[in-house]
Amino acid sequence: MFQSKSYIERRHGKTGTDRAYYLKKLVQEYETTDSKEAKQQVLANLANFAYDPINYNTLWDLHAIDLFLASLTDIDPLLREFGVGGLANICLEPRHHEYIMSQPTFRRNIVNCLDTQYSLNTKVNAMTTLMQLITAENYTTILTDELKTNLEKIQMDYQHVQAKNMASLFLLDYYHQ
């Protein structure tokens, strides 16, 4: 649910926990903890906060996007899943969109999340992120042969019908097949 600042104040009171402060503490905990479970929980929370546009400025200032992007290459499948979920939630915001598009490595790591070995949520969130990143100016940058090959593999995967259907739509809408 999208929330306004006045809604948050009505719900939590003006003396309640400041959201920016809370998000800052989450980022600090992620960066300092050695606990795998704590990292998973914190990144999942940050990804959920990335859904609401009221948090975009704070998450930008805290460089939360770097945590999402770094998690895409982590060996922990849950960190990868929560990281790409955070990207799917935040990538339409113009600064975050531009930042993701600024480095080929970022896009490649999102495409790599389409590997058939990854979870359903990881694949669906990666496809969602890529679809949301596509613009008239950058579609040739995103719509690579590698992406098409990954989508075709997912399309043949009968284990995850949701991912299969989404890959089919992606191929139809963007590759016209």
Image (spheres, rainbow, N blue to C red):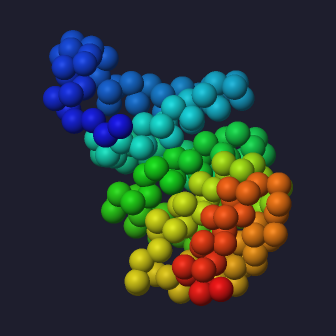
> Height in image: 15 above or below 31?
above
Residue 105 visible, this angle: no
> Height in image: 72 above or below 151?
above
At a point 64% along the width and 24% down the height, the residue shown is 38
User: Viewer-proximal residue, 88 or 27?
Assistant: 88
Residue 91 visible, this angle: yes
Locate residue 19, reporting x and y percent: 32, 27
Locate residue 81, reporting x and y percent: 66, 46
Which quadrant of the figure has residue 52? top left
> Height in image: 130 above or below 63?
below
Image quadrant where one finds the N terminus:
top left
At a point 21% along the width and 28% down the height, the residue shown is 7
Q: Is residue 177 left or right of residue 158?
A: left
Image quadrant where one finds the C terminus:
bottom right
Which quadrant of the figure has residue 15? top left
At a point 26% along the width and 16% down the height, the residue shown is 12
Which quadrant of the figure has residue 136? bottom left
Q: Is residue 125 left or right of residue 2?
A: right
Q: Is residue 47 left or right of residue 5?
A: right
Please give the count of numbered marks on the rendered protein. Answer: 0
At a point 41% along the width and 63% down the height, the residue shown is 97
Locate residue 144, reporting x and y percent: 64, 82
Q: Is residue 166 left or right of residue 60?
A: right
